[in-house]
């Protein structure tokens, strides 16, 4: 976000209480949100939210992307704050700065992808402890990935035999539609993807009723997804 003074149009747009509430919700979210998610959080009807989103987009406050994972024939619009939206006093949290420094330090000290995976597994196991009452590891993992901002999408498929399963062995494929660590992953792909790999592996191992068959990182032909099989 830029520190330049906001324009009169921006100030007018955010002078409305509903639009300001939408702005705050998007500022807090780790991933772009669809209209229905914003409406549910603010306890409003989607038809009430849509014109506010349109107005905020017109004045340059929002970026909008489109995907086809909504109802048939109705692609969903996903909203996020524009990169040059004014901060309005909402300073960025220190965690991204700390993450960049820690990754740079790890790289400087020669940390390997295996080191990153080991650290991720510890964190994943700790996170899984919160989901002891969940119906399955898959449901718990999807819920936690969504909480972290990965916007997981689940399909069923079969993985290749060289990935550790028979060709006709059905597994759940969890794709990461959004990566909250995308910028850092591009800068340090081995370490960041290693952390994510370990996070998922540690989580699933702690849940105990499933196993990771294949984790695809940015370097794979089918990037950013994991195959989970029930035991």
Image: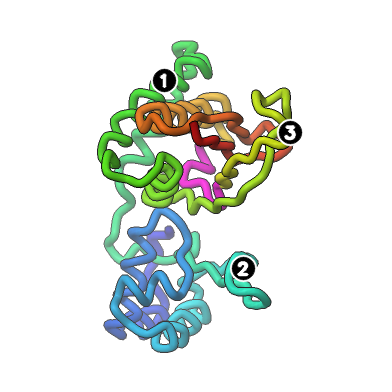
Instruction: Check whether the beta carbons of the residues at disc 1 and disc 2 lie within 8 A of each other.
Output: no
Count neighbours of disc 3 (C-alpha within 10 A) and say few if under 14, some if 14 to 19, many if 20 or more: few
* Among the two numbered marks 2 and 3 on one chain, the one whose residue lies closer to the N terminus: 2
Task: State the SS at label 3.
Answer: loop
- Compared with 17, 186 (above or below) is above
Residue occupying the point 42% across, 33% down: 209
The alpha-carbon separation of the residues under discs 1 and 2 comes to 37 Å
Does the segment drawn in magenta span residue 24? no
Q: Position of residue 102 (x, y in %)?
A: 38, 26
Residue occupying the point 51% across, 26% down: 194
Count neighbours of disc 2 (C-alpha within 10 A) and say few if under 14, some if 14 to 19, many if 20 or more: few
Q: Is residue 184 left or right of residue 98?
A: right
Q: Position of residue 85 (x, y in %)?
A: 44, 66
Residue occupying the point 52% across, 67% down: 78
* Among the two numbered marks 1 and 3 on one chain, the one whose residue lies closer to the N terminus: 1
Q: Considering depth in this image, is 164 or 13 the residue closer to the camera?
A: 164
Pointer 2: what residue?
A: 66
Count neighbours of disc 1 (C-alpha within 10 A) and say few if under 14, some if 14 to 19, many if 20 or more: few
- Mark on residue 145? none
- Compared with 51, 231 (above or below) is above
Q: Disc count in the image?
A: 3
What is the quadrant of the N terminus in the image? bottom left
Pointer 3: what residue?
A: 167
The residue segment tinted magenta is 176-184
The alpha-carbon separation of the residues under discs 2 and 3 comes to 33 Å
Q: Position of residue 103 (x, y in %)?
A: 44, 26
Pointer 1: what residue?
A: 105
Q: Considering depth in this image, is 84 or 72 the residue closer to the camera?
A: 72
């Amino acid at each position: 976000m830029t520190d330049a003074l906001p324009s009169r149009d921006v100030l007018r747009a955010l002078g409305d209480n509903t639009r300001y509430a939408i702005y705050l919700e998007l500022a807090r979210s780790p991933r772009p949100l669809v209209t229905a998610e914003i409406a549910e959080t603010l306890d409003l009807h989607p038809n009430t939210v849509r014109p506010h989103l349109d107005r905020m987009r017109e004045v340059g406050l929002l970026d909008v992307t489109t995907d086809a994972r909504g109802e048939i024939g109705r692609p969903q619009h996903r909203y996020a704050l524009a990169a040059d939206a004014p901060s309005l006093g909402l300073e960025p949290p220190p965690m991204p700065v700390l993450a960049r420094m820690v990754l740079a330090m790890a790289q400087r000290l020669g940390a390997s992808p295996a080191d990153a995976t080991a650290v991720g597994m510890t964190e994943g196991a700790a996170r899984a402890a919160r989901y002891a009452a969940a119906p399955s590891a898959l449901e718990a993992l999807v819920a936690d990935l969504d909480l972290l901002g990965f916007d997981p999408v689940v399909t069923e498929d079969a993985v290749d035999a060289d990935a550790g399963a028979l060709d006709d062995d059905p597994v759940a494929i969890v794709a990461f539609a959004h990566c909250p660590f995308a910028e850092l992953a591009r800068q340090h792909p081995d370490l960041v993807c290693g952390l994510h790999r370990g996070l998922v592996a540690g989580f699933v191992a702690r849940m105990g009723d499933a196993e990771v068959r294949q984790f695809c990182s940015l370097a794979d032909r089918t990037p950013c997804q994991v195959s989970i099989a029930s035991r």
